Image: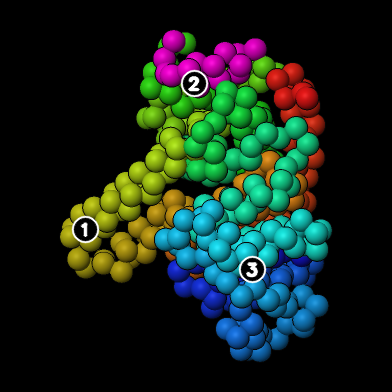
Amino acid sequence: MRIALDAMGGDAAPAINVDGAVIALAADPGLSVDLVGDPEYLEPLLAETDFDTSRLRVVAAEDVVGMDEKPTEALRQKPNNSIAVSWQLMAAKEVDAVVSAGNTGAVVAAGLRTRLFLPGVRRPGIAVTLPTMRGRGVLVDVGANPAARPEHLLQYAVMGTVYAREILDVESPTVGLINIGSEDTKGNDLYRGTHALLQRSPLADHYVGNVEGRGLYQGEADVLVCEGFVGNVVLKVSEGMAEFLIRVMAEDVLGQLENERDLALQKLKEVSRQYQYREQGGAPLLGIDGVCIICHGSSDSRSVANALGIAGTLQSRQVNSQIVAELADLAVVQP
């Protein structure tokens, strides 16, 4: 598998991306990585590695999309940016996947411009894995499509189901719809329409209905769907709350165990690690003909390496072919 890694994406780029690529290459002898970015910065870093150019090489891209730039404007004004070039490589079938810790909006927008959609997919969605009281769950979409329609959310339910089954090893995933109440009449037109579609879809036997926000972490469903605006708010609030609780726990525990400070801190780090983005590597943009993993801007080298690894897992477990097959069963997505 060959992956295009946006080497200029992320708060600590490009060093963390080169280091992450080296870690991933050492772990997987079948992996090759194209570092997409400015050769002036990348060549010296590449010279410090012992991988040959057949597995780790630089693909030139002059421009970089900043984290604070407006995605569409940046893509138009900087056509040779590292994100766009990465997508061009996948569109040309020169790589099998794109991984980026850069501007999320630009990653999604560049992907939408290529129209590299799987057959039947109307809009791709970003899926994140979150911890719950019953294990791990999937939330789709968390930012790719803030203006969704009911048929988009139905497709997210299908794609999330395949992801939960193949990547999280949930044998028969249940599906829930994020809403402001559990009753059938709750929500706006989008959510009432989606609820009706899910009730009569092939997923109906696994659909648990509307799920309120607190049900996400209680594990009321293995797959939860919503439009990108709501999903992004849920994700960012979750990140902030997790950080807050871990800090409070650390202060309380460390204050009571002064003689065992190092041990307590180590235990807290072990507990918190499963909730941190670096352990998941990144979030897949599902519905793409290929693989796209979007990493957190604060990713470190381990996170980048994990993202490259999950890209390989998505391909090896044939997630895309299963998504296409199951979407074909939905009458609402037929041409």
Which residue appears at 54% of the width and 31% of the height?
Answer: 148
> In the picture, residue 152 is in which quadrant?
top right
Is residue 199 magenta-colored? yes
Q: Which residue is mark 1?
A: 251
Work out how far the residue at label 1 is from the one at label 2, CA to CA, in angstroms: 41 Å
Query: Quick one: 108 or 212, which is closer to the camera?
Result: 108
Task: State the extent of the magenta-drawn residues as a range.
Answer: 185-200
Query: Quick one: 260 or 11, which is closer to the camera?
Result: 11
Is residue 251 magenta-colored? no
- Mark 2 is on which residue type? Tyr
Depicted 53 relative to depicted 224: above or below? below
Side of 265 relative to 293 (left or right): left
Side of 237 relative to 164 (left or right): left
Of the numbered discs 1 and 2, the one sitting upstream in the chain is 2
Q: Which residue is mark 2?
A: 191
Near mark 1 (Cα within 10 A), the count class, few <14, some 14-19 or many ≥20, is few
Q: Position of residue 328 (x, y in %)?
A: 78, 27
Work out how far the residue at label 3 is from the one at label 2, CA to CA, in angstroms: 39 Å
